[in-house]
Image (cartoon, grey):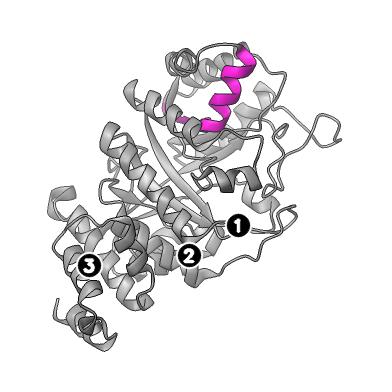
Amino acid sequence: MVALESQVETAGVAGDSGVARVVEKVLDGGRIGETEALALYELPLNLLAALADARRRQIHAERHGGRGNSVVTYIVDRNINYTNVCNVYCKFCAFYRTERDADHYVLSEAELDQKLDELTAIGGVQVLLQGGHHPKLGIDFYLGMLSHIREKYPHINVHGFSPPEFNHFAEVFRMPLREVIQRFQEAGLGSIPGGGGEILVDRVRDRIAPLKCDSDGWLKVMEIAHELGLKSSATMMFGHVETVEERVEHLRRLRVQQDATGGFTAFICWTFQPGNTRLKAEPVGSVEYLRMQALSRIYLDNIPNLQSSWVTQGPRIGQMALGYGANDFGSVMMEENVVSSAGTSFRLAREEIETLISECGYEPRQRNNWYELLN
């Protein structure tokens, strides 16, 4: 605490009574508002990091038998994109294809099994199952895929289908959204990823993904899923056409949702990756990523876990993120197709992740989707 107070003095914050009060509120474990978040965003990066680490310690002090602040978790899973056919044409995406493209695909059951066998061989416990918005696949395809995974690979949790996909399913199947989610759950869906969140402000969504569901539609899927007992993650993809105020609005909407339903297990943010995309925006760097991650940890006081995004930032920035509020190193992710299509490709084996965590003075522990320790 003395070191943090010294940073406050050095940064000149103590002379600004308004900002000093916000800093004190964070250190006392208090909830900050949107205006206060914008004030914190302007702080020197090292001070913001220290505040985020303080918030992390407040949240995790009692976890894992009182060792929560010394533990950093990770999961062994795999991203499987069951199809790359998509009809929403997001400007920031380099992965999607149309049915007219020669390299479009829908995975066969044999191809899916090969990927899941490889995941099982390295001790994997989860698959992140997502695809494009395929206009012709019916509900039997999805229910059959889920049932097959549950029966043949009962040890693997299906963390699958983003909120935009569910809105697409409801439209294509001509079925109420709640019924779609419930039927997927009955067939074997275990949890829902937070993909497609981008920025939960419709001005931004209309510019970067005008055919994708709006912010209310994204949140509605999560509300229903949480009511049905499905946990989910929450995400933010930033650094394109949004303002800082809109980033904070995104965080506000997630926090309100979490207050109401309590179903978000984790938050993950990452920066827009511009390669091979149609979105004309000046990308932001790692400093901005660390700043937003720290602010997110401080603001999202009701979402327990914050993941480091080494997949987009690289292993060393991912490692630094542990000092900016992250308590989880994400996934071994033996396969990733979407971000790599935009020109960013980092890969880490389990041993490398554990080394990166240990080098920062933390104890690496494998987890499942519900953040239960497995070793």
**Residue drawn where x is 51% and y is 56% of the image:** 270
Q: Residues within 10 Å of mark 2 (few under 14, many from 20)?
A: many
Kindly identify which numbered label has been placed on residue 125: none
Rendered location of residue 252, percent (x, y): 36, 48
The residue stretch that appears in magenta: 155-173
Q: Nearer the viewer, residue 87 or 355?
A: 87
Closer to the observer: label 2 or label 3? 3
Rendered location of residue 155, percent (x, y): 41, 28
On the image, which quarter does residue 343 sit in?
A: bottom right
Q: Marks 2 and 1, Cα distance to the nearest angstrom?
A: 15 Å
- Can residue 288 be seen here? The reply is yes
Q: Residues within 10 Å of mark 1 (few under 14, many from 20)?
A: some
Rendered location of residue 11, percent (x, y): 29, 85
Q: Marks 1 and 3, Cα distance to the nearest angstrom?
A: 28 Å
Residue indicated by mark 3: 22
Q: Is residue 325 above or below residue 218?
A: below
Q: Secondary structure at mark 2?
A: helix
Residue indicated by mark 2: 289
On the image, which quarter does residue 157 sit in?
A: top left
Q: Quadrant of the C terminus?
A: top left
Q: Nearer the viewer, residue 49 or 374?
A: 49
Kindly identify which numbered label has been placed on residue 241: 1
Which mark is first along the chain, 1 or 2?
1
162 part of magenta stretch: yes
Q: Nearer the viewer, residue 350 or 24?
A: 24
Which mark is first along the chain, 3 or 1?
3
